[in-house]
Image (tube, rainbow, N blue to C red):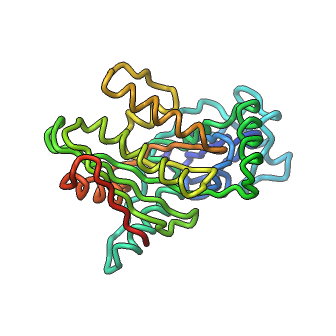
C-alpha cells in the first residue's frame, strides 16, 4: 500500500481540460475558485501506465504538472481510476481571533472545494436557462455579476424540538458580509437546514447578488438541491420547493457539501437562533 501511495496520481477533469497531478494541493491550480467554473471531477490512480507516461513525454510534459484537452483522451489512457473522496485538511487553531479563524476555515473549504470530492454542480449549466437568466438580469439593469458565498446550518434541540437557522454570507475572498440567524419554533433538524439555506438565499437576493456558491454540512439538502436525491418527506417538500424557486433566481448557482467541523460559523449562528422567537431574525453585519 505504501508503494501504491508513493506512485499515486490525481486526474482532474474540469470542463474540457484534464490535469494530472502528484498530490491534491497541486490540483487547486486546475480547480480554481470562481462560482462560474465548469463542473469538476477528481479521480485517483496508483500506477500510471507506461503508455500514458510516453504520451505525456511526447507532449513535452515529462515530470511536469500538465493539462490536456478532454478531446485528446482515450478511455484507458490512465489505467484504472476510482472516484476520489477525501477529507478536508485539518489545521491548528493557534492564537488567532475568531474572525481570522473563520476566514481561514472558509479558505480551507474553498481551497479544497468540498468535503467529499471536487463535486461542483452548477444549476445554471443549461444554455437556454442561462440565456433566459442573462436576459432577465439585463432587463433589471444589472450590469455586473455580483458574487457571494453562503454558509448555512440548522439546529434542533430534540429533533423535532426548539430549532434555529444560521447563515453566513461572505465575499469571494472569505471576508464576512453578515451573519444571520432565525428562530424556527419547533422543527426537525432537516427542516432547520432547509430554512437556513432559504434564509441565506433570500438575503443574498435582497442585496443584489446574482451569483452564489453555497457551502453546508447537510448532505440531504446538498444532494436534493442538486437533484441527486428524491424529496419524499412532505414536511420537507414545501421548503425544498421554496429553496428551488430562490436558487433559480441566481444567474450562477453552486452548492457544495462540506464536513461539519468546517461549517462551525454557520453552526454557531444556528445554535444562537434556537433561543429566538419563532420567525425572529437577527442580522449581524461585519
Q: Nearer the viewer, residue 6 or 31?
A: 31
Query: Is 117 situated above or below 145?
Result: above
Q: Residue at x 52, y 39 (%)?
A: 246
204 relative position to 276: left or right: right
Query: Is 104 situated above or below 20?
Result: below
Figure disc tally:
0
Q: Residue at x 68, y 42 (%)?
A: 38
Query: Is 191 situated above or below 146?
Result: above
Q: Quadrant of the C terminus?
A: bottom left
The percent coordinates of residue 131 (x first, y second) are 77, 36
Q: Residue at x 43, y 21 (%)?
A: 230
Q: Which picture quadrant has residue 171?
A: bottom right
Q: Which picture quadrant has residue 261?
A: bottom left
Q: Residue at x 51, y 43 (%)?
A: 255
The percent coordinates of residue 262 (x first, y second) are 37, 56
Q: Which picture quadrant has residue 268?
A: bottom left
The percent coordinates of residue 234 (x first, y second) are 33, 21
13 relative position to 277: left or right: right
60 relative position to 144: left or right: right
User: Which residue is situated farthest in the bottom direction here?
Assistant: 95
Query: Is 42 situated above or below 269?
Result: above
Q: Nearer the viewer, residue 210 or 257?
A: 210
The percent coordinates of residue 211 (x first, y second) are 62, 50
Q: Is residue 249 visible?
A: yes
64 relative position to 121: left or right: right
Q: Quadrant of the N terminus?
A: top left
Q: Nearer the viewer, residue 54 or 142?
A: 142
Q: Is residue 63 visible?
A: no
Amino acid at each position: 500500500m505504501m508503494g501504491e501511495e508513493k506512485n499515486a496520481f490525481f486526474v482532474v477533469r474540469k470542463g474540457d481540460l484534464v490535469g494530472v497531478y502528484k498530490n491534491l494541493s497541486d490540483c487547486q491550480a486546475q480547480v480554481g475558485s470562481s462560482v462560474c467554473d465548469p463542473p469538476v471531477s477528481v479521480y485517483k490512480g496508483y500506477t500510471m501506465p507506461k503508455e500514458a507516461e510516453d504520451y505525456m513525454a511526447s507532449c513535452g510534459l515529462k515530470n511536469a504538472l500538465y493539462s490536456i484537452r478532454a478531446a485528446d483522451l482515450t478511455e484507458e489512457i490512465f489505467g484504472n481510476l476510482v472516484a476520489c473522496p477525501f477529507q478536508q485538511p485539518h489545521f491548528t487553531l493557534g492564537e488567532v481571533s475568531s474572525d481570522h479563524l473563520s476566514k481561514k476555515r472558509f479558505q480551507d473549504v474553498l481551497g479544497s472545494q468540498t468535503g467529499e470530492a471536487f463535486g461542483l454542480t452548477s444549476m445554471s449549466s443549461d444554455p437556454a436557462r442561462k440565456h433566459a437568466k442573462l436576459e432577465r438580469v439585463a432587463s433589471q439593469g444589472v450590469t455586473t455579476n455580483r458574487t457571494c458565498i453562503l454558509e448555512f446550518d440548522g439546529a434542533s434541540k430534540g429533533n423535532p424540538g426548539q430549532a434555529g437557522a444560521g447563515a453566513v454570507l461572505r465575499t469571494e475572498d472569505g471576508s464576512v458580509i453578515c451573519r444571520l440567524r432565525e428562530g424556527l419554533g419547533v422543527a426537525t433538524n432537516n427542516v432547520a437546514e432547509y430554512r437556513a439555506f432559504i434564509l441565506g438565499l433570500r438575503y443574498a437576493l435582497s442585496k443584489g447578488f446574482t451569483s452564489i456558491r453555497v457551502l453546508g454540512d447537510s448532505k440531504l439538502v446538498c444532494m436534493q438541491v442538486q437533484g441527486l436525491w428524491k424529496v419524499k418527506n412532505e414536511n420537507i417538500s414545501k421548503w425544498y420547493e421554496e429553496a428551488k424557486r430562490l436558487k433559480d433566481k441566481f444567474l450562477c448557482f453552486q452548492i457544495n457539501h462540506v464536513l461539519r467541523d468546517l461549517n462551525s460559523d454557520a453552526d454557531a449562528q444556528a445554535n444562537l437562533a434556537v433561543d429566538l422567537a419563532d420567525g425572529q431574525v437577527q442580522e449581524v453585519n461585519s
